[in-house]
Amino acid sequence: MMNRTEAAFTPESVTELLRREGLRITRNRRGILQALFESGRPMSLQEIQSAASSHEGARCSYYEISDPRKHYDHLICRSCGSVVLIDIPCPIGDSEKRIARQYGFRDLSHSLEFFGVCATCP
């Protein structure tokens, strides 16, 4: 019988450890763990991203510099993962103000993402 120090070192055991430590178990984390376990060697960030994408589907993370004086909402393709900045006034700006008043919050902000399939995907 295995004691705690002899427990199997698997993606599942690491996932459980992360969960016990209070971390969310996301699709990205699962993909990264799977890629690292399957490689059996140290990997660069680019290698991890490439290998993990086969476990995560087409999703990946995008980063942008955002001007705090502006608001950014996005369209995200469920098929290819492309991200498009929505260039119209925020459709829920008035609702945000009403929510802030109703719940007594100040400096309220939000991030709005719409998911669909872009025109270039079948």
Image: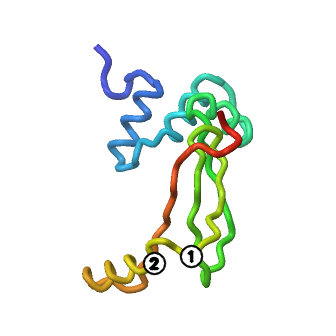
Q: Is residue 38 above or below residue 60?
A: above
Label 1 Cα neighbours within 10 Å, binned few <14 / some 14-19 / many ≥20 = few
Q: Is residue 69 above or below residue 54?
A: below
Amino acid at pointer 1: Pro
Q: Work out whether residue 99 or residue 88 is closer to the camera in this orientation and state it.
A: 88
In terms of image quadrants, where is residue 54? top right
Image coordinates of residue 15 in percent, x first then y, are 42, 35
Q: Work out whether residue 87 or residue 23 is closer to the camera in this orientation and state it.
A: 87
Q: Image point 30% across, 23% down: which residue?
A: 3
Q: Give the numbered dot on residue 93.
A: 2
Image coordinates of residue 111 in percent, x first then y, are 49, 66
- Report whether 109 appears left or right of 59: left
Residue contact at pointers 2 and 1, CB within 8 angstroms: yes
- Report whether 101 appears left or right of 15: left
Q: Is residue 60 above or below residue 92?
A: above
Q: Give the numbered dot on residue 89.
A: 1
Amino acid at pointer 2: Gly
Quadrant occupied by the C terminus: top right
Quadrant occupied by the N terminus: top left
Label 2 Cα neighbours within 10 Å, binned few <14 / some 14-19 / many ≥20 = few
SS at mark 1 in the image: loop
Image coordinates of residue 116 in percent, x first then y, are 54, 46
Q: CA distance from mark 2 to mark 1?
A: 8 Å
SS at mark 2 in the image: helix
Q: Is residue 31 above or below residue 22?
A: above
Q: Image point 61% across, 80% down: which residue?
A: 70
In terms of image quadrants, where is residue 14? top left
Q: Image point 46% across, 25% down: which residue?
A: 9
Q: Work out whether residue 65 or residue 114 is closer to the camera in this orientation and state it.
A: 114
